Amino acid sequence: MEPRFLLMADVAEQLNVSTSQVYHMVRSGELPAIKVGGRGQWRIERAKLEEYIERKYAETAEWVRSNPLVVDRAEDEPFA
């Protein structure tokens, strides 16, 4: 059984970003987390990470729809 809560380092590894980037996402409120223990270590619930990923997929899909790829055909033609 997988643990319910993840360390910031675990989240960083799963997202392929640095731990400091995860810390920034948590502190900015972008990624929900809790502080536990006497030293106040951050933990991210696995379900919240999955929700975050789904939100990012939706945001990216919306951005792609709003910013269609424009191909300049003149650049695609080989030199004559």
Image (spheres, rainbow, N blue to C red):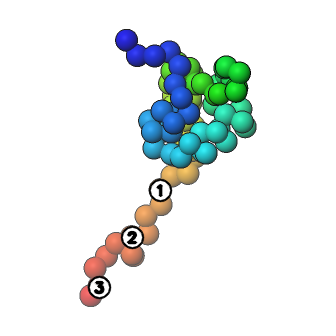
In the rendered image, residue 41, in percent from the top left (x then y), is placed at: 65, 27
Disc 1 marks a residue whose amino acid type is Leu
Q: Secondary structure at mark 3?
A: loop
Label 3 vs 2, first from the N-terminus: 2
Label 3, on which residue? Answer: 79
Label 3 vs 1, first from the N-terminus: 1
How many residues crowd around disc 1 within 10 Å: few (fewer than 14), some, or many (20 or more)?
A: few
Tell me, for residue 69, which label it has, or none: 1
Label 2, on which residue? Answer: 73
Q: Nearer the viewer, residue 15 or 39?
A: 39
Up the image or down, 31 lies above or below 47; here it is below
Label 3 with label 2: CB-CB less than 8 Å: no
Disc 3 marks a residue whose amino acid type is Phe
Q: What distance separates the C-alpha of mark 3 from that of mark 2?
A: 12 Å
In the rendered image, residue 65, in percent from the top left (x then y), is placed at: 53, 43
Residue 61 visible in the shown view: no
Q: Nearer the viewer, residue 27 or 36?
A: 36
Up the image or down, 35 lies above or below 13; here it is above
In the rendered image, residue 67, in percent from the top left (x then y), is placed at: 55, 51
Residue at 39% x, 76% y: name it. 74
Q: Residue furthest top?
A: 1
Q: What distance separates the C-alpha of mark 1 from that of mark 2?
A: 12 Å
Viewport quadrant of the C terminus? bottom left
Residue 3 visible in the shown view: yes
Residue at 50% x, 15% y: name it. 4
Left or right? Give the position of 64 relative to 30.
Answer: left
Q: Nearer the viewer, residue 44 or 40?
A: 40
Give the tally of numbered discs: 3
